[in-house]
Image (spheres, grey):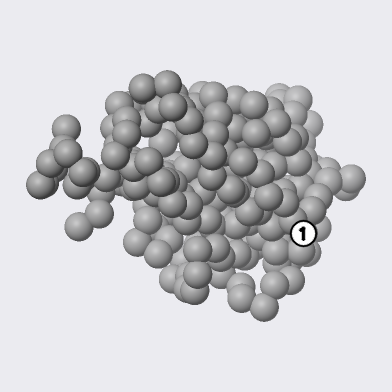
Amino acid sequence: MSEFLKIDLQAVFNHKAILEDKSLVSVTGLTELGLGALKSFFKSSYYPKISEIVEIKGVPFVFPNNNIDSYDNIQCAGQVISLPKGRYSKAYTISFNEFVDSEDLLELLFSDGSKETINLHTICWGTAGLKNNRFTFINEIFGGNEGVLHGKSTNMTDVGCTFSNLDIINGNLFLSEILLPYNPALHIFSITLEINNACVHCTGRCK
């Protein structure tokens, strides 16, 4: 049975993208908030409750604390995410791009000094809701390594974010950090890692 590490990103969050109504902007007390030219938001009533564990295709995610006065996503600017020592076989993300469909590189930094890059394909939040396959957080998503998580914006337009399943090639090495790309249009809600319990150095669990 697969085991997972749900990464707590709250300390790295630097942007707010979830709000029930744009009229609440003035009471957030936050400075970095809103998406696109219209400074819209993901409407919070369409998304999980505060810090709820969300399961997508058997993968658990911690959904961000979307209190009105809390940041709820990472606007990517080259941040480094430190990890507990461990071997991981996959990385799963919930992300979105503010303006366009994009492909970015996540750099994995291992404890022996080696590196690996993995591609993160992210769909524009405004066009994601128009894709043929629409998903919600409360339904099973299906097909391939990517899916659209469907919702509404504060303007009541169809929007969405991307679920991605990313293979880690060097899963038998100890991963220590993830370096995010510099792309302010790329936003990340949540990251979960799948623990690699079997490695090439042993016949079972490797600690």
> In the image, is residue 174 above or below residue 19?
above
Instruction: Point out residue 63 in the picture as x, y percentages from the top left corner.
Output: 48, 46
Say which of 200 and 163 sits in front.
200
Q: Eyeballing the image, is 53 above or below 32? A: below
In this view, the residue farthest toward the bottom is 132
Q: Residue at x 43, y 33 (%)?
A: 8
Which residue is outermost to the right? 37
Q: How many marks?
A: 1
Residue drawn at the location 35% of the way across and 47% of the way down: 89
Percent across and percent down for residue 131 are: 70, 72
Lateral position of residue 97 relative to residue 137, left or right: right
Crowding at dot 1, Cα within 10 Å, few <14 / some 14-19 / many 20+, comes out as many
Residue 189 visible in the current orientation:
no
Nearer-the-camera pick, 175 or 29: 175
Q: Quadrant of the N terminus?
A: bottom left
Residue 36 % position (x, y): 83, 46
Residue 162 horizontal/vertical position (percent): 60, 57
Seen in the image, is 185 located left or right of residue 135?
Answer: right
Tell me: residue 28, above or below residue 129: above
Residue 199: quadrant of the picture? top left
Q: Is residue 8 visible?
A: yes
Q: Amino acid at mark 1?
A: Gly
Q: Identify the element where label 1 is drawn.
A: helix
Q: Looking at the image, which residue is at 60% across and 25% down?
A: 79
Identified at 62% across, 41% down, the residue is 105
The quadrant of the rendering that contains the C terminus is top left
Q: Is residue 164 left or right of residue 32?
A: left
Residue placed under numbered mark 1 in the picture? 126
